[in-house]
Amino acid sequence: MAKILIVDDERSVVEHLRELLTQFDYSSNFITKTNFLFPILDKDPSDLILMDVNMPGTDGVTLLKQLQCHPVYKAIPVIMVTGELNDWLLNECFEAGAVDYINKPVQELVLKARIKAALSVKFEKERSQRLLENILPRNVADELLLYGKTEPQFYPEASIVFTDFCGFTQIASTWDVKDLVKELGRYYDYFDGVMEMYQVEKLKTIGDGYMFAGGIPESNQTHAIDCVLSALEIRNFIRTMREVRKMQQDDVWTIRIGIHSGPVIAGVIGSKKFAYDVWGDTVNVASRMESQGVDGEVNISEATYHKVSSFFQCELREKVEIQGKGTMDSYIVHDPLPTLQQSKGVPNKKFWEAYSGYCVSLPTVQKIIHTKKTGIDVFYLFGKISVKHINELKQVLKPVVSDPSVSKILINVEQVSIIDSQSLGFIISCFNLLQKRQANMSICSINEKLDQLFKLAHLDTVFTIYSSEKDALDALNCSND
């Protein structure tokens, strides 16, 4: 059941609307004062908002603009309700982000039809977004939806894994195509579950080959361990299935797995049929590790070996010829070290304690600096601001924002490459808190991508955004003087 929030200061209108919404099988809530809007949405999110234009204090259009600045609540469709219909007002409402309007007094059939249309568009958009997030990593999908494009990223450390079913061509020649695809699908469904279990990124399937990676799209220091754990899980599953098939006197499937660690570029290129992919020499070597591997085993490069040898039993093989690279050492990975496993290759408590020491993500934000300049609290943010840094942002920003003696704040994001929606939402909540006590907050940005984000979210109508720190400091020093 969809939930609808009514924003109107007239009790009779609220009661009438709630009665109609109940008849339409919608649940509803209401507020009569605009300063309750964000608190009630925080507590009880809504699917649609019916907003009166002529609200006391903050008018409906201004409130709508503030909603459009919020990274989460801007997705809520807003239908404006007004008794003063004119072209100028309609244009202002639509420019501010309204999806529709309704005249007062509200007519039952009109209300029902317009709510249904607005909710249909919202739910279809959400379905499309879920589909996109199922194809691409979430942060890449968010960037694509936000900017209309996404830039491939360089990762100095990642691990790439290739798997391939041995003798698949021969097996395929004896199977019915439908049965073959169905069977392959069962294996890949299990592999997908392994990806989720060890938080590694599925990249693609190529016929009977399955490719995944660790350390992307979010960098971490456990990527090689995660990939080996995933590979061993897949290996063990295939071994179990082999035994079952032998008992059934059916075709036996065997797999080869190869892993290499090193720098990669990952992202989406092109403008149609988006696919998240990786490029670089690391990918080529990982592919060779698989093709030159041993049937039924996990073959890793020397680079990967140095990252996992303190966790797993590794067996040095004879040097392997890698096209374009000459000869390289490679290793067969067996199970965790005897001291780090319970039984039958299952990692024990000591394994996970050692693993936890590696679980600090590689920093994508260099630092957050707080200083004072001419009596103004200035915050410098660097690098990529993601959801991982919410706690750091809160620890640094919140005490200052909550301090009644602080009246002027500048956030300098000149060196920020990208900022995610939750971090942006927190900054906006800081602004709302400051606004309540008539304090000033400005943003300094010369980053083209962020400037586009601010304009897209109408932040330039809420914050004062300057292209230089000097201009921002001068303006803040002149304010409230």
Image: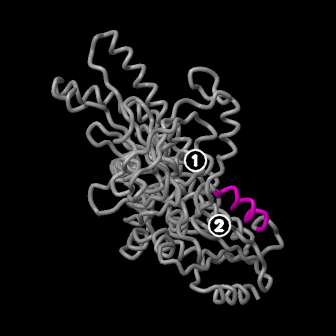
The residue shown at (68%, 67%) is 367
Please state the horizontal and vertical placement of residue 15, each as a whole percent of the image: 53, 47
Quarter of the image for residue 398 reads bottom right
Determine crowd level at label 1: few under 14, some 14-19, many 20+ residues with C-alpha closer than 10 A. few
Quarter of the image for residue 171 reads top left
Q: Which residue is mark 2?
A: 366
Secondary element under disc 1, as helix, strand or loop, is helix
Q: Give the overall secondary structure of the magenta segment.
A: helix
The residue shown at (65%, 62%) is 429
Q: Is residue 199 on the magenta stretch?
A: no
Left or right of 409 on screen, residue 290: left
What amino acid does circle 2 point to?
A: Gln
Q: Which residue is mark 1?
A: 306
List the single residue furthest toward the right.
Answer: 405
Quadrant of image for the C terminus: bottom right
What amino acid does circle 1 point to?
A: His
| Residue 143 vertical placement versus 222 (above, below) | below
Please state the horizontal and vertical placement of residue 143, each as a whole percent of the image: 44, 61
In primary-sequence order, the first of circles 1 and 2 is 1
Please state the horizontal and vertical placement of residue 59, each as a whole percent of the image: 55, 68
The residue shown at (38%, 20%) is 241
Query: In terms of depth relative to the viewer, which is nearer, 329 or 478?
Result: 329
Please state the horizontal and vertical placement of residue 24, each as a whole percent of the image: 40, 40
Q: How many marks?
A: 2
Q: Is residue 398 on the magenta stretch?
A: yes
What segment is highlighted magenta in the picture? 389-400
